[in-house]
Image: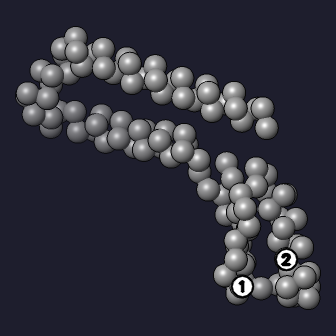
C-alpha cells in the first residue's frame, strides 16, 4: 500500500512510498528545508491499492447480498442456479486469483 506525504500549507504531495518510514523521511526533509524545522499542517496517508479496493468492495457486496438473500426476486434466484452463472462465477474468481498472484509476483520483484 502506498504512503503519501502531503503538506497542506505548500499544497504539495510526495510520490508514493512503499513504507511509512520512507514517507516520514520526505516529511522531515520537507519540514527542514521549506519550513525551517517548523511543523506545518501536513499528513502521511495510506492509500489502498487496486487489489485492496476491489477486495473491500467485493466483501461489502457479499455482506449486502447475504443479508438481502431472502428479498431477491425469484428470477434472480433462478439465474443463479444455472450452469452459465456458475461457470461465469468460477472464471471471474479464477481471473481475480490470477490478478492477485501477478500483483504479488511483480511486487516482490521491486
Q: Nearer the viewer, residue 23 or 12?
A: 12
Residue 63 visible, this orientation: no
Query: Which percent across, then down, holds residue 97?
Result: 52, 24
Residue 87, located in which quarter of the rendered image? top left
Q: What residue sits right under mark 2 in the picture?
A: 30
Image height of 99 relative to 71, above or below: above
Image height of 107 relative to 30, above or below: above
Q: Nearer the viewer, residue 86 or 17?
A: 17
SS label for mark 2: helix
How many numbered marks does the figure carry?
Answer: 2
Query: In the drawing, does residue 10 fall left or right of residue 57?
Result: right
Query: In the drawing, does residue 97 fall left or right of residue 21?
Result: left
Query: In the drawing, does residue 75 fall left or right of residue 102?
Result: left
Quadrant for the C terminus in the image = top right
Image height of 15 relative to 92, above or below: below
Residue visible at 85% across and 88% down? 35
Residue 10's tag is 1
Mark 2 to mark 1: distance in Å?
10 Å
Residue visible at 31% across and 42% down? 64
Query: Which percent across, then down, holds residue 105?
Result: 69, 27
Residue 93, located in which quarter of the rendered image? top left
Residue 56 visible, this orientation: yes
Residue visible at 70% across and 77% down? 12
Structural crowding at the residue carrying mark 2, measured as other residues with C-alpha within 10 Å and reported as few (<14), some (14–19) or many (≥20):
some
Residue 40's tag is none
Query: Which percent across, then down, holds residue 62?
Result: 36, 36
Residue 80, located in which quarter of the rendered image? top left
Q: Could you tell me if the residues under marks 2 and 1 are in contact, i.e. CB atoms within 8 Å?
A: yes
Query: In the drawing, does residue 74 fall left or right of residue 99?
Result: left
Residue extending farthest to the left is 74
Earlier in the chain: of badge 2 and badge 1, it is 1
Amino acid at each position: 500500500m502506498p504512503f503519501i506525504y502531503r503538506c497542506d500549507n505548500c499544497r504539495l504531495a510526495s510520490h508514493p512510498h512503499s513504507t511509512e518510514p520512507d514517507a516520514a523521511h520526505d516529511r522531515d526533509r520537507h519540514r527542514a528545508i521549506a519550513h525551517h524545522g517548523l511543523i506545518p499542517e501536513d499528513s502521511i496517508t495510506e492509500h489502498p491499492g487496486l487489489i485492496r479496493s476491489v477486495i473491500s468492495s467485493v466483501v461489502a457486496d457479499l455482506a449486502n447480498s447475504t443479508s438481502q438473500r431472502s428479498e431477491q426476486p425469484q428470477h434472480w434466484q433462478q439465474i443463479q442456479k444455472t450452469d452459465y452463472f456458475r461457470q461465469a462465477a468460477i472464471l471471474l474468481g479464477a481471473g481475480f486469483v490470477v490478478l492477485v498472484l501477478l500483483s504479488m509476483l511483480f511486487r516482490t520483484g521491486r
